[in-house]
Amino acid sequence: MKKHTLSALVENKFGVLARVAGMLSGRGFNIETLNVGPTHDPKLSRITATVVADEAALDRCIRALDKLVNVIDVQNFTEVDHVARELVVVKVNSTAKTRSEIIEIAGLFRAKIIDVGHKSLIIEFTGNDRKVCAFLKIIQPYGITELARTGQVALQRGV
């Protein structure tokens, strides 16, 4: 079993996301992340999902996705050179003593402080899966009180 990043270019119509998510869950895939948004063409959206599956099941899944109405193209980014990013917004406990340490860590990761409260900071961070995990591991000891993640968005490199 391996994590796979799938991208489906779909028509921007009512019910398409529900059909795609339903097909994935109906075939027994646990959807780890799911992201959908418009593309440069207002008639199209891109659905990006990360799922854990073996190769045979994933191949059947991709073929089934390709057959869905309103699905234009499906790509498995796991096997091609691609760029993937995720946005994380995290609220971290901070005191007068720890605030400068947290700000320094955020700077090392090129994260942005987007809100400052008396007892917390909210940090925005964008990166690939490994960098997101590394950032959260380092920030965690300060006390994460809230966390929101977008899930991956991805595009194939250079073709």
Image (cartoon, grey):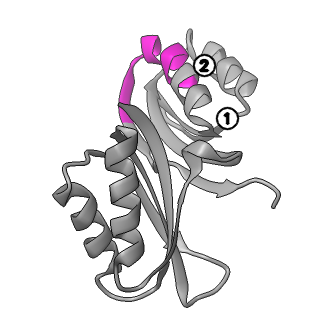
Q: Main SS type for the magenta part? A: helix
Give the residue at x 45% y 26%.
92
**Counting residues from the N terminus, which is met first, the one under dot 2 or under dot 1?**
2
Q: Is residue 86 visible?
A: no
Asked which secondary structure carries label 2, the reply is helix
Viewer-proximal residue among 24 and 127: 24
Q: Nearer the viewer, mark 2 or mark 1?
A: 1
Is 103 inside the magenta-drawn segment?
no
Give the residue at x 46% y 50%.
150
Q: Position of residue 5 (x, y in %)?
A: 49, 48
Asked which secondary structure carries label 1, the reply is loop
Few, some or many C-alpha atoms within 10 Å of disc 2 (few <14, some 14-19, many ≥20)? many
Q: Position of residue 94 (x, y in %)?
A: 49, 20
Q: Residue 42 shows which numbered tag?
A: none
Q: Which residue is mark 2?
A: 102
Q: Residue furthest front?
A: 56
Q: Residue furthest right?
A: 158
Image marks 2 and 1: residues in contact by CB distance under 8 Å: no
Is 142 inside the magenta-drawn segment?
yes
Residue 156 vs 140, above or below: the answer is below
Q: Residue 111 shows which numbered tag?
A: 1
Region of the chain picked out in magenta, as a range: 135-146
Few, some or many C-alpha atoms within 10 Å of disc 1 (few <14, some 14-19, many ≥20)? some
Q: Amino acid at mark 1?
A: Ala
Viewer-proximal residue among 32 and 106: 32
Quarter holding the C terminus is: bottom right
Q: Amino acid at mark 2?
A: Ile
Quarter holding the N terminus is: top left
Give the residue at x 70% y 27%.
109
